[in-house]
Image (tube, rainbow, N blue to C red):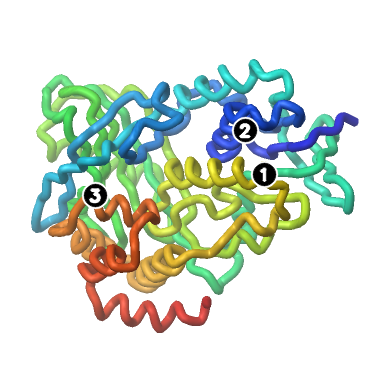
Amino acid sequence: MKHYHYIFTGSGLSALMTVYKMAKSGKFKEKTILLLDENLKKTNDRTWCFWQIEKGDWERSISKKWNSALFANGDFKRNLDLQPYQYNMIRGLDFYNQVFDFILSEKNISYVNQKVTDINELENHVFVATEKETYTCDTVFNSIYNKSEVESQTKYPVLQQHFIGWFIKSEEPVFNPEQATFMDFSVEQKGNTRFMYVLPTSTTEALLEYTLFSHKLLTKEEYEQEIKLYIQKLGIQNFEIIEKEQGSIPMTCYPFMNKTTKRVLNIGTAGGWTKASTGYTFKNSDKKSTQLVAFLQKSKELREFHTKTKFWFYDLLLLNILDKHNELGARIFSSIFKKGSPALVFKFLDEETSYFEDLKVISKCPQLVFIKAIGRSLRYL
């Protein structure tokens, strides 16, 4: 039975970012690291987008950047100048290749293609079982999300950011490759928060995603019918589907940090690293993984890693509203983007704003709706 200093159960975004930064830091060369996952990460299985001002660790993996974005609903359209930010797209396979090309050249890092079946923590070490073998380690970083645990509780609202996306190539040059469509709420809402998300890479090619922030998933046919209607609205008569993708990301302020133990730390979606109010994952995981690598160099108690901030409460407010009145999503997001500064909104979503800046963003939202949500949310403090 082989022993490691660190085992990562699951090799999703958060695990790969963390291990990559551990290796880049040069501070963990004496530590043995094992990643366990049933997925080999050899396919282009997802797309991530994020905004940033300066170039970061993932420049090699970025396939497209935009300086401008469109926000729309049934009543107005606004072209958003994103400066000083850029909106970036990363395709899953490009990210996987960047990470694995580097980490697997490190002698102290191993990747094993096995499904984790059990994590058993003892006083001095942790047993990690797969379908084939058992390993031991000092510390586990777990990114395997326990869906039933979160969705079976009723105290904290749980919604989903769920979507189906088509990469298409049209015969007609209808797209503006210099502008992404950040949110288009002009699609029929049907009592939910529904929007179209468009990432054009040329005048004839784009990723179109039909996205909802709601409780229940749709049938595959419902998503795809809405994509077809949107394509028709764009004036596209002839096109081919190059790829498809599908996902569902939990949106919740459930206190994942309470599950941290002496030797097991949940990370990624399993650790609450997803931005609860939007479902955005990449930027939050990038920041959290940097914080974790710095934290590990200080040899602190794992339970000290997570801290609850004012932004947790802001996210909770929005989730409380969408939980009770899911149809209000378009109105709320439209109020923020109609006249507000796009750069300030992105800074707010990055959780980097001051209280004064918070007020400038939140004050644009429907006030009565949020006042009622504050009353409902105080019981969580």
In front of the other: 275 or 174: 275
Badge 2: few (under 14), some or many (20 or more) residues near its Cα, within 10 Å? Answer: many
Q: Label 3 sits on what residue type?
A: Ala
Q: Position of residue 166 (x, y in %)?
A: 32, 32
Label 2 or label 3, whichever comes before in sequence order = 2
Q: Position of residue 295 (x, y in %)?
A: 63, 47
In front of the other: 217 or 27: 27
Asked if labels 2 and 1 touch by Cβ distance under 8 angstroms, the answer is yes
Picture disc at residue 343: 3
**Distance (Cα) linking label 1 and label 3:** 32 Å
Judged from the image, the secondary structure of the residue bearing numbered disc 1 is helix
Q: Give the quadrant of residue 176.
A: top left
Q: Label 1 sits on what residue type?
A: Leu
Badge 3: few (under 14), some or many (20 or more) residues near its Cα, within 10 Å? Answer: some
Picture disc at residue 22: 2
Badge 1: few (under 14), some or many (20 or more) residues near its Cα, within 10 Å? Answer: some
Judged from the image, the secondary structure of the residue bearing numbered disc 3 is helix
Q: Residue at x 13, y 59 (%)?
A: 339
**Distance (Cα) linking label 2 and label 3:** 31 Å
**Distance (Cα) linking label 1 and label 2:** 9 Å
